[in-house]
Every structure is written in C-alpha cells, then in structure tokens.
Image (spheres, rainbow, N blue to C red):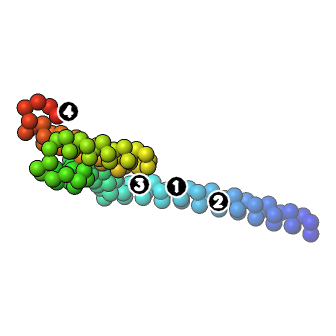
Amino acid sequence: MVVKEEEAAKILANLIVMGSGILARAFVQAYRQALTNASKSGVAQETIQNTVRRASMAMTEAEARQILGVSEGSPWEEVLQKYDTLFQRNAQSGSFYLQSKVHRAKECLEAVYGGKQQGPPS
C-alpha cells in the first residue's frame, strides 16, 4: 500500500504543477488580449488625449481674477499684492497645488496687463 500512496502523491503533485502552468499561460494570454482590445478600441489613446487637452487648457482671465480676488478695474499693484499674500499663505500651509494656481493666475494677468501698459509689468 505504501507504493500506491507514493504513486498517488506523485500523480497529484504532477497534476498541481501542470494545472498551475496551464492557468499561468491562460492568464498571460488573457492579459495580452485585453491589452490588444484596449489599443484597438482607442481607450489608451483617448485617455492620453484627454490628459494632454486638460494640461494644455490655458487659464481664462476671469478665472485668474477670481483666484486672486481682483476685479477688471484693479490696478496692477493690487494684483501683485494679492498674489504675494496668497502665494506666501499657501507656501506656509504646504499647498503646492493652490500655490501653482495662484502663480498661473498672476502669469495670465501679466499678459493682460502687459498688453494694456507701455512697459512690462513688474
């Protein structure tokens, strides 16, 4: 009986090894097929294009004014004062995202005020 148990254990071990190999190959094939389907359907390209579109969208003047809290009639000095205050406040609190939004708002308004003034804004 000992011989039969050893043979059964070997057969069982072989089945487990072969079965796991078959499952691994099936998983790899399914993953490759999923990648192929995603590239054919354009999901990957669409995601990349949406990311590029969002990154390239420029801030509008109205959004910049709202971020800095200035009106259309505000002088450039007031814009700089608001920028400095908000930039420093966000630097202290550690919000890099808000700090970058404040900086982009100032850049946007520099273009607006630069076109209305003779010299470049300070």
Residue at 41% across, 54% down = 35
Q: Secondary structure at mark 3?
A: helix
Residue at 38% across, 48% down = 90
Between label 3 and label 4, give the one nearer the viewer. 4
Residue 20's disc is 2
Between label 4 and label 2, give the one nearer the viewer. 4
Tell me the distance, in whole angstroms, between the alpha carbons under discs 3 and 2. 23 Å
- What's the amino acid at mark 3? Leu
Q: Which residue is mark 4?
A: 122
Circles 3, 1 touching at the beta carbon (< 8 Å): no
Asked if residue 37 can be seen in this view, the reply is yes
Quadrant that contains the C terminus:
top left
Q: Which of disc 1 and disc 3 is earlier in sequence?
A: 1
Q: Which residue is mark 1?
A: 28
Residue furthest to the top: 119
Q: Which of disc 1 and disc 4 is earlier in sequence?
A: 1
Place residue 34 in its image quadrant. Answer: bottom left
Mark 2 surroundings within 10 Å by alpha-carbon count, few (fewer than 14), some (14 through 19), many (20 or more): few
Mark 1 surroundings within 10 Å by alpha-carbon count, few (fewer than 14), some (14 through 19), many (20 or more): few
Place residue 43 in its image quadrant. Answer: bottom left
Q: Which residue is mark 3?
A: 35
Between label 3 and label 1, give the one nearer the viewer. 3
Tell me the distance, in whole angstroms, between the alpha carbons under discs 4 and 2. 69 Å
Tell me the distance, in whole angstroms, between the alpha carbons under discs 2 and 1. 12 Å
Residue nearest the viewer, comparing 42 with 122: 122
Tell me the distance, in whole angstroms, between the alpha carbons under discs 3 and 4. 52 Å
Relative height, residue 19 to residue 113 (above, below): below
Q: Which of disc 4 and disc 3 is earlier in sequence?
A: 3
Residue at 47% across, 56% down = 31
